[in-house]
Image (cartoon, helix red, strand yellow):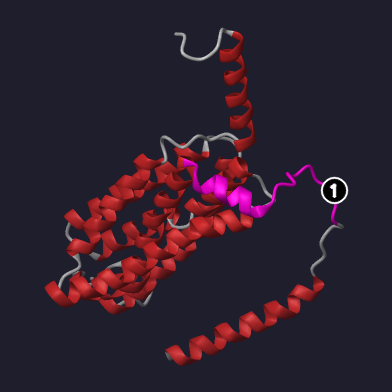
Amino acid sequence: MPWQTVFVVFAGIILVSMFALQMMRAPERVQTTASDEPMGLVIQRALKDPTFWFIFIGFFSCGYQLAFITAHFPAFITEMCGPISPDSLLYVLGVTSASGLGAVSIAIIGFFNIGGTLLAGWLGHRFSRKYLLAVIYLLRTLVSAAFIITLVTPETVVLFSVAMGSLWLATVPLTSGLVAHIYGLKYMGTLYGLVFFSHQLGGFLGVWLGGAMYDMYNDYTIVWWVGVGVGAISALIHLPVKEFPWAQRTQMAQAQHAEVVRGGGFGKP
């Protein structure tokens, strides 16, 4: 279809979804044990917490990598990928040009993203979210680096799309779950919104820098390696995250303070 028609189809799908909302049912609101602290105080506390900033900075690379690939990967493949062999499965399936492969690669990423995101959410209920995030960012870094240092062929494009798609939005349920676990559910939407702002900043930089560097050097290599670097930083910066509820941390600090007082006051070893 022409791209204009595609947008019309998207608009139709959204319209149908709006009608479907009327059939959704939600349970009655029940009393919760959520804190009665005002939102301003909770946000102020989070902004003073190094853990919040670790999560905030870590989410930046997710936006950078995803937006750069979404906006520039099809053009990169069209320019850099080798020819598609008439004997290959891709050719048999109707993908006969590099530009066509660029579109298919985004579709492959989207398809494998479904399974990767669901798996990440399932794992997040059973294992440490911060270590899962560190592993995902590390794998993204390795996959991107391996793709750049090898010859770009139809086969490597498909393999990269499968691998990156599996890691694509796998960070979202883990990051949002981490924010909810540490700071509670009452203001989780607001706090995760602040963290997601970092994701959007990364997305802006990935799209803009990709175009700016290509205009300057007629090449995407620098932008790819910047993505590798920020991915590695994100993998490392999640390691010092304190992955237990803020209230629990406060209680532990108060208990340690009381222990010091009982032990004879401050200043003694």
Describe the element under mark 1 as helix, strand or loop.
loop
Residue at coordinates 56% horizontally, 14% vertically from top-left?
260
Q: Is residue 66 visible?
A: no
Residue 206: image location, x then y, percent: 32, 66
Residue at the location (70% across, 79% down)? 18
Determine which residue is flagged by label 1: 31
The reply, left or right, for residue 211 in relation to residue 259 is left
Residue placed most toward the observer, 120 or 203 = 203
- The count of marks equals 1
Residue occupying the far left of the picture: 217
Residue 33 part of the magenta-drawn span = yes
Residue 167 appears in the figure? yes
Residue 149 left/right relative to 33? left
Residue located 27% across and 52% down the image: 228
Q: Is residue 45 above or below residue 108?
A: above
Q: In this view, does 13 lie above or below 1?
A: above
